Structure formats: C-alpha cells, structure tokens
Image (cartoon, rainbow, N blue to C red):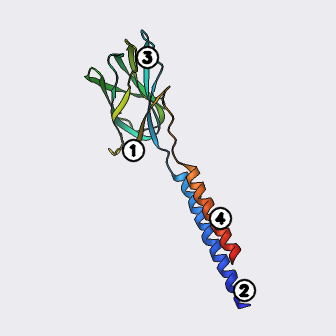
C-alpha cells in the first residue's frame, strides 16, 4: 500500500510540474510584444510617371524621434519631395536634406508629444521616373527613439512588388515546445 502511495505521489508531482510548465509557456505568449517594423512600399516604376514611395511603420510604442536615409538610383528616379506622415492620426513633421544625388536623409522629432503608439506612415517620398531600370530604393541608417530617449528595436525591411515577404517565428515555435513537453509527460506517465 505504501508503494502505491509513493507511485501516486510521483505521478501527481510529475503532472503538477508538467502542468506548471504548460501554464508558464502559454502565459508568456501574450506578454511578448510584437516587433516594430519599418517597410518601404514602392509602386511599379513607369518612365514618365510620378511615384509615391511610403515609409510605413507597424507596432511602434512611445515613438518620439527618428531618422533614416533613403538611397535610390538617380539615373532612374529624380527626387521631388518628402511629405509628412501620420501615425494613428498624429502628424509626423519631417525635415530632410539631400546627402548626394542618390540619397535623401529624413529626420523627425515629435516635440511636446508624449509618444505615439500604433501603426501608420512615417513619410511619403515623391519621385519622377526619368529612366528605365530599377529604382534601387533602400533604407539605411534607420534609428527610432522613444520618449525616454531609448532606442526602439525595429526590423527595417523593404516591401516592393518584387520582394519576398519575410516570415518570423512566433506562436508556432512556442506551441511546438509546449507540445513536446506534453508528449514527454504523457510518455513518462505511461511508464510509471
């Protein structure tokens, strides 16, 4: 009888540990913040047309300031202008300057704002398509800062018709880990 009590106690303890790991794993999933992403969205380039390239941001929290460089093929695109963006209805006032014939630097600082959170458009950059070929649009030197003057980690990508969408690991990885733990516990219970 004492042997059955020990076995029952071992099973209960093992079950409790497995259940606790399961709860911890699932409790951590909602707490993970979504990654801030900045993407360049460019329409198809047709010689003689004007194109509007947008710099879009998703899942930002407490954004206060930032900068980026946008380089382009100056034999295909003629820079025209940079227009202010908007995130969740708040205007993003921009300053810009040409670094060289193929690079424009854009900076912003949201003075008097307690930080913007959400998704929207940082800027719109206007080009005239003056030649044939690729525009070679590329964001570099990207930096975002929050209201406490800390850097906001962001995934700076490029989105155009020819680009492949990046996939990131997420809930699937956590679910696979939890499933593996559950299978381990079931096998362990079956052997006892």
Image point 44% across, 25% down: which residue?
54
Cα separation between marks 4 and 3: 54 Å
Q: Nearer the viewer, residue 188 or 149?
A: 188
Residue 39 sits in which quadrant? top left
Task: From the image, tell me which residue sits under label 3.
Answer: 51
Q: Which callout, 2 or 4, points at the residue further toward the start of the chain?
A: 2
Disc sitting over residue 9 in the figure: none
Pointer 3 or 2: first along the chain: 2
Label 4 to label 1: alpha-carbon separation = 36 Å
Quadrant housing residue 86: top left
Q: Eyeballing the image, is 15 above or below 124?
A: below
Q: Earlier in the sequence, mark 4 or mark 3?
A: 3
| Of marks 4 and 1, the one in the foreground | 4
Q: Marks 2/4: CA distance?
A: 24 Å
Q: Position of residue 95 (x, y in %)?
A: 31, 25
Label disc, if present, on residue 4 of the rendered structure: 2
* Residue 16 appearing in the image: yes
Q: Residue 183 bears which disc, if any?
A: 4
Q: CA distance from mark 3 to mark 2?
A: 77 Å
Q: Which residue is mark 1?
A: 153
Q: Is residue 21 above or below residue 192?
A: above
Q: From the image, which quarter does the N terminus lie in?
A: bottom right
Who comes first in sequence, dot 4 or dot 1?
Answer: 1
């Amino acid at each position: 009888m004492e042997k059955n009590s020990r076995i029952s106690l071992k099973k209960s303890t093992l079950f409790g540990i497995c259940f606790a790991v399961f709860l911890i794993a699932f409790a951590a999933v909602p707490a993970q913040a979504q990654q801030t992403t900045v993407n360049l969205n460019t329409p198809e380039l047709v010689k003689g047309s004007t194109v509007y390239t947008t710099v879009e941001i998703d899942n930002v929290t407490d954004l206060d300031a930032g900068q980026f460089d946008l380089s382009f093929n100056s034999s295909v695109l003629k820079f025209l202008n940079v227009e202010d963006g908007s995130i969740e209805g708040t205007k993003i006032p921009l300053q810009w300057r040409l670094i060289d014939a193929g690079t424009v630097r854009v900076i912003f600082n949201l003075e008097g704002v307690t930080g913007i959170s959400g998704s929207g458009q940082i800027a719109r950059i206007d080009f005239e398509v003056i030649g044939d070929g690729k525009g070679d649009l590329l964001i570099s030197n990207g930096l975002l800062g929050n209201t406490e003057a800390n850097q906001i980690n962001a995934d700076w990508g490029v989105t155009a018709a020819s680009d492949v969408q990046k996939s990131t690991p997420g809930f699937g990885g956590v679910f696979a880990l939890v499933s593996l733990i559950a299978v381990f516990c079931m096998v362990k219970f079956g052997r006892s």
